[in-house]
Image: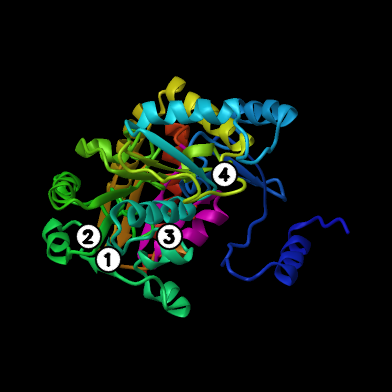
Amino acid sequence: MRVSGKERIVAQELQHYMPVFSRQPLVIERGTGAIVTDTDGNDYIDCVAGIAVNSVGHCHPRVVNAIKAQAEKLIHTSNLYYTEIQARLAERMTKLTGMERLYLTNSGAESNESAMKLARKVTGKKGFISTKNAFHGRTMGSLSVTWKEAIRQPFEPLIDGVTFVDYGDVNAIAGAVTADTAAVIVEPIQGEGGVNVPPDDYLAAVRELCTEREIILIVDEVQTGFARTGKWFACEHANVIPDVMTLAKGMGGGFPVGAMMSRESFQFAPGDHGGTQSGNPLACAAALATIDVIESEHLVEQSRSKGELLKKLLSGIESPYTVDVRGKGLMVAYESSRSVVPVVDFARKSGVLLNNTSENVLRFVPPLVIAKEQIETAIAVVERAINVHPR
Ligand SMILES: Cc1ncc(COP(=O)(O)O)c(C=O)c1O
């Protein structure tokens, strides 16, 4: 049965799809750059970017062409064989990150799952130290190091030996280390937790502690990687090279692909780990094209300058409530002592897509290619929304 029209599509989905997502009443049909269009032909400035995924914009022609060209050659072949495109991506990614080994995944959770297994394998230890308000994914391992009780509790028992400490406090990590600690896992800026930026010296201090105590440092760059924060990878703000770095989201320009990268001394042996569809050729082609776009369109620099504009505009909005604007590059939060939920609804109805990580925090992670005028238009709508809903 062909389904067309918003109501019919929503009804079809509600009847057949598992109800895990609380979706907004919007059916998106297409996208280009920082604009998405719904089935009624309405355009929206997208300040969500598929939750920090469409960093090079929707359907970037270079990504589209790379996927098309690869699809005509080879879509899948398994990891029983080599492919040129996977080898090329491995070399490119190691040069880009300063890490020495790449393992490809299909999502952020899978990247963290891989990292946790690697940490246990190379250390022979079981324990993990994670941080309060951390989000690392929803598979059993990655969920075990994710903070939010409501999404963890129904699936317990999760893996043993996880300790959560205050984010931004290296002494809290030091105090939690035991003889059985395999790894510390930490986001350079917490994303789902509400764009929480730690003190400037935090990550370097965590690096030092992990080296001293011979603990693996896993830096989760799933959300912050690929120019999102105004550097290729957010740990560059602190000049830190982790032992293991996990990636996904912005890596494939919208195509599902992720990675776990490690130092030469921390590796799996053959048979330790794997995945049938890991390193899919289409995913590799999309990732290589995305890296090319970030480089050739100077999106690292653009993320920085547009992020400054975004923060300036948000800070200029008058509000009778207590407000905090924070973030790096184009990963920015607007926190208000009053609920921001009506702002999200108002903005959508006015042609701007926003996302809130909680009742009080709006998170802005637009495509890095968003134009400055589009940022100005979007923030003018946010300002109107705040004025329309003063209480
Ligand atoms: C920092 C971080 N790690 C891991 C994940 C999980 O990624 P995925 O949803 O691709 O499994 C997310 C998703 O929001 C994330 O923000």
Q: Nearer the viewer, residue 43 or 103?
A: 103
Find residue 251 and report its horizontal and vertical position in percent: 48, 38
Identity of the residue drawn at 48% across and 53% down: 110
Q: Is residue 166 left or right of residue 189?
A: left
- Give the CA separation, mark 3 to mark 4: 32 Å
Q: Badge 4: how crowded within 10 Å, few (<14), some, or many (20+)? A: many
Q: Which residues are magenta?
A: 343-367
- Give the CA separation, mark 2 to mark 4: 32 Å
Q: Earlier in the sequence, mark 4 or mark 1?
A: 1
Q: Badge 1: how crowded within 10 Å, few (<14), some, or many (20+)? A: some
Q: Which residue is mark 1?
A: 132
Q: Nearer the viewer, residue 50 or 174?
A: 174
- In the drawing, what numbered circle is on residue 167? 2
Q: Which residue is mark 3?
A: 356
Find residue 339 and report its horizontal and vertical position in percent: 38, 68
Q: Earlier in the sequence, mark 2 or mark 3?
A: 2
Dot 1 lies on which element?
loop
Find out if the beta carbon at label 4 lies less than 8 Å from the nearest ligand 1 atom. no
Instruction: Residue type at mark 1: give it.
Output: Lys
Within the image, what quadrant is residue 256 found in?
Answer: top right
Instruction: Residue type at mark 2: give it.
Output: Tyr
Q: Earlier in the sequence, mark 1 or mark 3?
A: 1
Q: Which residue is mark 4?
A: 278
- Give the CA separation, mark 2 to mark 1: 6 Å
Identity of the residue drawn at 31% across and 64% down: 126
